[in-house]
Image (cartoon, rainbow, N blue to C red):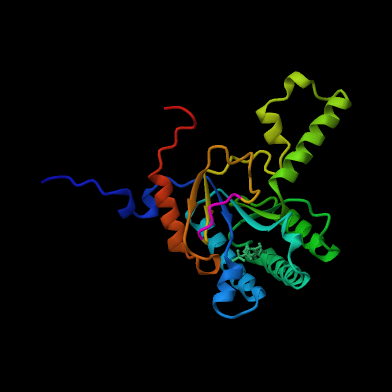
Amino acid sequence: MAFFKKKKEQLDISQLELPKHIGIIMDGNGRWAKKRNLPRSAGHNAGGKTFRKITRYCSDIGIKYLTVYAFSTENWKRPKAEIDALMKLFKDYLEEALKDFKDDSIVVRFIGDKTPFDDELKALMIENEEGSKDRDGMVLNIAMNYGSRDEIVRCVKNIAMGVKNNEINIDSIDEKLISDNLYTANQPDPDLIIRPSGEYRISNFLLWQSAYTEFVIMNKLWPDFDTSDLDEAIKIFNNRNRRFGGI
Ligand code: FPP
């Protein structure tokens, strides 16, 4: 009897190679709300639910690192009412996350500059990091007030300071030293970055880290994004031929 090899798109994700690190640009909340004549904050609330569902799913299927883009250094340009609604949503989620992600052993980390957030939010961020740091499950990086250019500027300043103080020799500056001075130090680079909502942009997300990342753009708005869409992205990833500059 002929043996028919199953195509990768017919396989269950448990039979596929999982990306070790997935990045997600959670885009399309505003458009989702607009389509329903709802305020933008309703889109962010719906996006928050998707964030929770997809985070738990990634942890369940065995993803080791997940980085979600929640608020960029440029998002402060949005109207005050929208920023206020987002900050409230972050507080509500982070209060719940303390208990919620405990069962899944998720390690919560924030990448970005915490300084501009108010004391209550800063305290919740620190509490989540401290309270989860000894867990052994998936590392969840929540990018808040994150911008990759800002991250690189900070990295350059750190290294320049090291040189000035005779702690770093210029000849020892290499790619590893730069990676070690980013928020994602000691983590693998993302294998896969997913952007829902059909936009073909990187939007200042993990610029250094995504040198050899596979990008998957999906035509779903983030609040509509489901676990089956994540499966689909992993299948697309499995059909890519990653060469890392080789042949
Ligand atoms: C981009 O969509 C989305 C944001 C700026 C906010 C994302 C935040 C969440 C999903 C909440 C997650 C909660 C935690 C605690 C991490 P957009 O508003 O730019 O959408 P548009 O392009 O359709 O206008």
Residue 241 inside the magenta-drawn segment? no
Residue 216: x and y in percent read: 48, 51
Residue 98: x and y in percent read: 69, 64
User: Which portion, as a residue range, is magenta?
Assistant: 198-202
Q: Is residue 94 above or below residue 201?
A: below
Q: Is residue 225 left or right of residue 163?
A: left
Residue 200 inside the magenta-drawn segment? yes
Secondary structure mainly formed by the magenta segment: loop
Q: Is residue 235 left or right of residue 73?
A: left
Farthest residue to the bottom: give it: 37
Viewer-proximal residue, 194 or 54? 194
Farthest residue to the top: give it: 171
Farthest residue to the right: give it: 165
What residue is shown at x 47% (from left), y 55% (from top)? 61
Tell me which image quadrant ligand 1 sits in. Answer: bottom right
- Residue 211 lies in quadrant: top right
Residue 170: x and y in percent read: 78, 21
What residue is shown at x 44% (from left), y 51% (from top)? 234
Viewer-proximal residue, 98 or 94? 94
What residue is shown at x 40% (from left), y 38% (from top)? 241
Viewer-proximal residue, 228 or 196? 196
Viewer-proximal residue, 71 or 104? 71
